[in-house]
Image (tube, coloured by chain):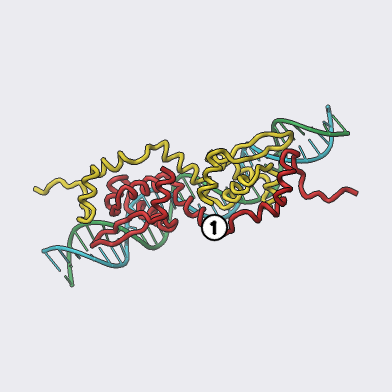
Chain colours: A red, B yellow, C cyan, D green
Amino acid sequence: MHAMKETDIPDSIRCEFEERGGITGIVESLPDDQVIEDIVSVARALSDPVRVRVIFALSVQPMCVCLLVAMTGYAYSKMSYHLSVLKEGGLVCARQEGNYLIYYPTDLGRKVALWIG
Amino acid sequence: MHAMKETDIPDSIRCEFEERGGITGIVESLPDDQVIEDIVSVARALSDPVRVRVIFALSVQPMCVCLLVAMTGYAYSKMSYHLSVLKEGGLVCARQEGNYLIYYPTDLGRKVALWIG
DNA sequence: CCATTGTTTCAAACATTATTGAAACGTTGG
DNA sequence: CCAACGTTTCAATAATGTTTGAAACAATGG
């Protein structure tokens, strides 16, 4: 009879691997699903050059959409879309001032802009 | 004649905005394109839960693809694809050992795993 | 040399995101 | 109330990303 083997593992890592409790042990040491999802949504927000520029610009100073549009040359609808992705990722928010919407980074947005800078 | 106006700006930000050199000044203070692209490629690498789990797992300990496959239940080709995205983002690399490829985090990968954890 | 094992590559199907222009919404000033 | 302005929403299209299974590759052991 052949022994029941979990998975073949190269010698160089088997020992360390088993000390850590094998697959089960490692899986248990990973962050839970909610944390993973939060990381992913921030990462998604930063995974487009338009949005990275916008969040850097906003962390220099809050701006209305019309300024962002003037700065980038993009259409309003495009900018609006990207701002909404940044908002969903929790990186920016906005306050209304008269006819204008002024976007600015959240605390998280500021932290992230510092990290990646 | 109507004056040539750059863009209408709400009062609450005009002053600060002009002190910073207007659009030109702000654009100049942004990171240059290459830096932005690097940020985007790291962010893209982290913008999928599979990959976030993999990079956490690898920073617990280096693993061959077969272990990652056993750990997640994904097909080899799928895992291989995600590993290649992580590699392009500069977060992981691999060394060959006999028949096995053992993936491990780069310095950047380790830093990132610490930050986001 | 052959068969096996671990891994990658490829092309096709599929799913998610991004871009566009037009229309709608809310606020302001006349 | 009406017109103008800043902004968002929507639906259609275009572009990217992801998944799948089959085939190819490279290293190992017989």
Q: Nearer the viewer, residue B2 or B62?
A: B62
Horizontal and vertical percent for residue C14? Answer: 58, 54
**Residue at the far front in the pictured view:** A19
In the displayed structure, would residue B44 be above or below residue B32? below
Q: Report which quarter residue A71 is drawn in.
A: top left
Horizontal and vertical percent for residue B22? Answer: 24, 44
Q: Report which quarter residue A106 is drawn in.
A: bottom left
**Residue at the far left in the pictured view:** B1
- Chain hosting mark 1: A
The residue under the point 34% across, 41% down is B30
The residue under the point 55% across, 47% down is B113
Direction from residue B100 to residue A91 in the image, left or right: left
Give the secondary structure at mark 1.
helix
Direction from residue C26 to residue A44 in the image, left or right: right
Question: Label 1 amino acid?
Answer: Val
In the displayed structure, would residue D4 be above or below residue B16? below
For the residue carrying disc 1, how many other residues have a C-alpha within 10 Å: few (<14), some (14-19), or many (20+)?
few
Residue marked by disc 1? A35
Q: Report which quarter residue C4 is drawn in.
A: top right
Total labels: the figure holds: 1
**Residue at the far right in the pictured view:** A1
The residue under the point 12% across, 47% down is B3
Horizontal and vertical percent for residue A100? Answer: 26, 59
Horizontal and vertical percent for residue A108? Answer: 42, 54
